[in-house]
Image: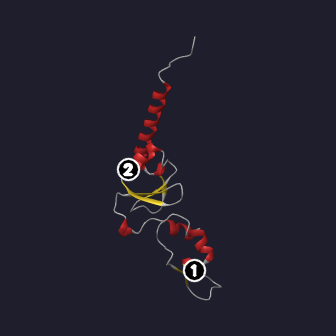
Amino acid sequence: AQLRVLWQSGHISRETMLWRESMPAWLRLEEVPEASSALLSLAQPPPAAAAPVGEWYYVDADGRQRGALTAEQLGVLLRGGDVDGLTQVWRSGMAAWAELSCVQELRAQLLSAADDAEGDDAAAGGGGGGGGG
């Protein structure tokens, strides 16, 4: 569990050297089957040099990292249904990936997308009003 937290926060990488009792020598994380199988498929923030502050990254439905995007661009993806409140997002300065709905700065985009969806539903309803008679 501790390795998972370190991996998802970007503090360790596939090149990080690992050792535990019963191992004859230090090995890179990617060379330790039980560590690599558990971690390499999980999202990890991009390297700090590649992540300007304010640019967002997200994990798509196929588990691939996407970005860098502005909050407004994430809003467009929300309204298009490409991401939702459960989508994992990250940007430089965050300790770990988080659900979009849990990131205060992005909640405005989520609420805006929800408002747009309600407006579309009302328009699709066609103003039929009350019950038939």
Q: Quadrant of residue 93?
A: bottom left
Residue at coordinates 55% horizontally, 77% vertically from top-left?
A: 30
Q: Locate residue 79, reporting x and y percent.
A: 44, 43
Render colour scheme: secondary structure
How many neighbours does mark 1 have within 10 angstroms: few (below 14), some (14-19), or many (20 or more)?
some
Image marks 1 and 2: residues in contact by CB distance under 8 Å: no
Left or right: 71, with 84 as reference point: left
**Which amino acid is tagged 2?**
Gln
Give the position of the C terminus as an image quadrant: top right
How many neighbours does mark 2 have within 10 angstroms: few (below 14), some (14-19), or many (20 or more)?
some
**Disc 2 target residue:** 73
Relative vertical location of residue 123 with respect to residue 64 in this rendering, above or below: above
Residue at coordinates 59% horizontally, 74% vertically from top-left?
A: 35
Question: As rendered, which of 66 and 97 lies closer to the eye?
Answer: 66
Question: As rendered, which of 41 and 90 lies closer to the eye?
Answer: 41
**Disc 1 target residue:** 31
Relative vertical location of residue 49 with respect to residue 132 in this rendering, above or below: below
Q: Locate residue 21, reporting x and y percent.
A: 63, 84
Q: Secondary structure at mark 2?
A: helix
Relative vertical location of residue 121 with respect to residue 106 in this rendering, above or below: above
Residue at coordinates 56% horizontally, 85% vertically from top-left?
A: 26
Give the position of the N terminus as an image quadrant: bottom right
Q: Locate residue 56, reporting x and y percent.
A: 40, 57
Relative vertical location of residue 46 with respect to residue 22 in this rendering, above or below: above
Quote the CA–CA distance across marks 1 and 2: 38 Å
Left or right: 128, with 72 as reference point: right
